[in-house]
Image (spheres, rainbow, N blue to C red):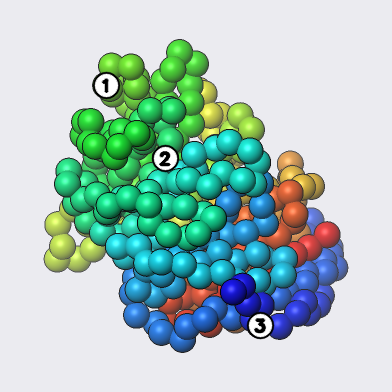
Amino acid sequence: MPTTLGQGWGLIVDLEPGDGESVAVEIETSHWDLPTTSTAGYGSNLVRVPGTTSVLSTLPGGRMYLCDVLTGEIRTGQRLAGELRAVVFDGGHVGRADGAWALATFGLCRISLASLTRTGENIRQGLGKYQGRMVALSHDVLGISSFYGKSLILVSRHDGTVLKRLRMGAPALVYPLPGGRHRCWSPHNAVATDLDLASARCVARHPLPYGKGSVLIGDQVLALTGEREDMPGVPDVWDVRSRHVTTFDAWTLTELHRISAPEDSIEVLGTDVEGRILITSRRAVTFLTPGSFDVETIYQHHADLGGALLLPKQNRAVLQSSITMGNGLTVIRWK
């Protein structure tokens, strides 16, 4: 049976400088406990169910759960083969799309949202383990990649069979181009690759600054850009230290705007109803005003963030603390 755990909404008034003045912004917070206290596992991504206010994720060990971020109602289901990485929903009626492909740490499978059960075998052949991202490239093809690798696997959306592996930077952001092509951003590898799906070929590669946390907003891409920092003693392994929030034209890749990034920035979440830009950091969410990119307010979290998800039309964000904390979900909302 569904359960409601945790506590209700609280109110904090956050005072932060913006455009030389103090701006008072009210941010309400709510905390929803999850039905486990284990901190085992690698951590699970949060995925919003289209047309709803619910997020789908997994508990440590791979057990699926749905949480309504407005009420805290939680429903649990069966286990996946590891922690959830990504979901591609079948579509259909808004809020009633039952079937989906779910990518987990150790494979790909079909799931039912209605029953939170696996409806097909776990598929690993040709995929291996530890893939991190999945996107729908068409009604027939999925694209699956690791977080920081140098390939993209094309997979049948009908039965999960591997169609082809392409040598390219693993994309963190994919969006369609005219003519049936897709632009695949891999800021970790400092490249954007144009993919022609009909021929399953990479037809163009464009240099980018090193970066992370990119998102498409209208006709622009916002990304955290910075410097590559190689891991001492480990060949071909590096991280990117964010220095700037940079805006690019999505089609020409022209740099349009650049400002200093908040300290310890992780990703650009997107924009809210009023067009504010939200950026997550190690222990904070920074709100930038549209146009001027001034800091409007900063929400300080009580622990290191292990993930975040924006519900833009509701002016809400769901925050997941680091897996070592094991203390549920925090929802913030603002006006």
Q: Residue at x 76, y 59 (%)?
A: 296
- The residues tagged by marks 3 and 1 sit, at their Cα atoms, a distance apart of 49 Å
Q: Which mark, residue 201? A: 1
Can residue 102 be seen here? no
The x and y percentages for residue 113 are: 51, 54
Q: Residue at x 74, y 45 (%)?
A: 275
Which class describes the residues within 10 Å of circle 2: few (<14), some (14-19), or many (20+)? Answer: some
> Earlier along the polypeptide chain: callout 3 or callout 1?
3
Residue type for callout 1: Arg
Disc 3 crowd, CA 10 A, few/some/many (<14, 14-19, 20+): some
223 up-or-down from 230: above or below: above
Q: Which residue is mark 3?
A: 6
Q: Which mark is residue 186?
A: none
Please identify, in this view, whether the residue under mark 3 or under mark 1 is nearer the observer.
3
Q: CA distance from mark 3 to mark 2?
A: 33 Å
Residue position for label 2? 135
Can you give x and y, in whole percent of width and height, for residue 137 in the image?
41, 31
At label 3, which amino acid type do we have? Gly
